[in-house]
Structures are given as structure tokens and as C-alpha cells.
Image (spheres, grey):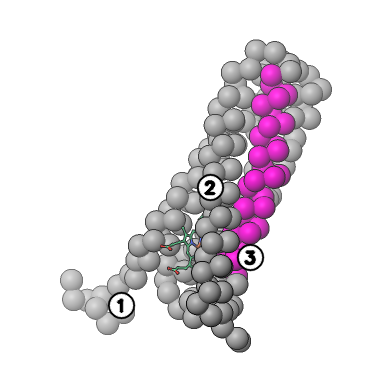
Amino acid sequence: MPKLGLSGLKVLKILHLITACLWLGGAVGLYLIVFLLTKGDSAGEIYGYNIAGKLIDDLVIIPGAIGCLLTGLIYSLFSNWGFFKQRWLLIKWILTVYCVLFGTFFLGPKINNQPLIAKEIGLDALTNPTYLSHLGALTIGGLIQVCILIFMIYLSVFKPKGKPKNKVNES
Ligand code: HEM
């Protein structure tokens, strides 16, 4: 497999960092909006918060997550980092794939559905069991995503090596 040169790696890092910023920034923004969802006191306000959350998901989080995954893949394929040579990188792969799947199949459908409910029943959404259970799931699920993304930034910067196998019994 051909490898990227020094400039190629720098450009790749810029793209990787921009997409990681979009993903985490979008996730934090959406999380704040999910909190505001309980505070609306008119049908328009509730719908507005929900549609703003969906826009952040569609236009910031999803492009950020796809970009991060793709730039990660380019790192693994076209640089010496590889896929599983380093434990921190293996963990990043597992967590990134987990976050993408959790976001796509668990959080995403709820984020898309909330504005539809709000548009249809307005303020009654605040006492609607489906709407409220989605809200609860988004609050907990969103917090988990944000924590995992921050943990991945820690892993990327510190790159903890873990214990080499031959030193396990020395401590
Ligand atoms: C498929 C998943 C991913 C792979 C394979 C991957 C791989 C890499 C690699 C090889 C580096 C270069 C390290 C260096 O040059 O020092 C890097 C840097 C970085 N990654 Fe990822 N990454 C992935 C996902 C993510 C995610 C989801 C985030 C955060 C949201 C993230 C945040 C960062 C940061 C902040 C750096 C810069 C670290 C530094 O320069 O000190 N990465 N990543």
C-alpha cells in the first residue's frame, strides 16, 4: 500500500481535526438544545428547538462523523499507523464505529421524529409519552456520545501504550 508523504500527512491531520471538531462541537450543541426542549412555552418554540437539533445533526454531526471515519480510514490505510498496531488506535476504531452505529440507529431516528411530533401536537408534546421517552433517551445517549468523543481526544493526544506483555507480572 503506498504511504502518504509529510505534506500529505499534515493535510490529513488538518482534515481529521476539522471533522473531529465538527463532530464534538455538533454533539455538544445538540446536547444543549435537547436540554432547552423542555423549556419551550409555545408550540412554535418547541418545534423550533427540535428542528434546530435536527439541522445540527444533519449538517454538522453527520458530516463530522463521516469525515472523521474516512480520515481515520485514510490514516490506517495510507500511513504507518496501521489499524491495530497500537492499542489506543484499536480502541479508537472500536469507539468510533460504536458511536457511528449508536448515532445512526438509536439517536438519529429519535432526532428526526421529534420535530414531526412537535409539529403535529404542539405543546401537548411536553406530556406525550413517546416524545418524553425520546427526550430521556437523547439526554442520556447524547451525554454518553459526548463523553466518548472527549475520551477519544484524550487517547489521541496521550496515546497510552498499555502494559507490554512481558512486563505484566513485574508490578
Ligand atoms: C476511525 C477512527 C479513527 C482513527 C483510525 C484515527 C486515527 C488517528 C491517527 C493515526 C492520528 C495521528 C496521531 C499523530 O499523528 O500523532 C489521529 C489524531 C487525532 N485524532 Fe483520530 N482517529 C480516529 C477517530 C477520531 C475521533 C472520533 C476523534 C475525536 C472526536 C479523533 C481525534 C483526534 C485528534 C484530536 C488527533 C490529534 C492528536 C495530536 O495531534 O496530538 N480521532 N487520529
> Which is nearer the eye, 30 or 165?
30
Which residue is drawn at the image coordinates 71% and 25% (left, top)?
48
Q: Which residues are magenta?
A: 45-73
> Which is nearer the eye, 69 or 13?
13
Which residue is drawn at the image coordinates 69% and 19% (left, top)?
45
The reply to whether the residue tagged 2 has its Cβ within 8 angstroms of ligand 1 is yes
Q: Position of residue 143 (x, y in %)?
A: 50, 40
Q: Which mark is residue 70?
A: 3
The single residue placed furthest to the right in the displayed view is 120
Q: CA distance from mark 3 to mark 2?
A: 16 Å
Of the 4 image quadrants, the one containing the C terminus is: bottom left
Q: Secondary structure at mark 2?
A: helix
**Among the two numbered marks 1 and 2 on one chain, the one whose residue lies closer to the N terminus:** 2
In the drawing, does residue 23 fall left or right of residue 89?
right
Q: CA distance from mark 1 to mark 2?
A: 32 Å
Q: Position of residue 85 (x, y in %)?
A: 45, 78
User: Which residue is disc 2 drawn over?
Assistant: 24
Examine the rendering and report whether any part of residue 111 can be seen. Answer: no
Q: Mark 3, residues whose alpha carbon is within 10 Å: few (<14), some, or many (≥20)?
A: some
Q: Secondary structure at mark 1?
A: loop
Closer to the observer: label 1 or label 2? 2
In the drawing, does residue 154 fall left or right of residue 79?
left
Q: Which mark is residue 135?
A: none
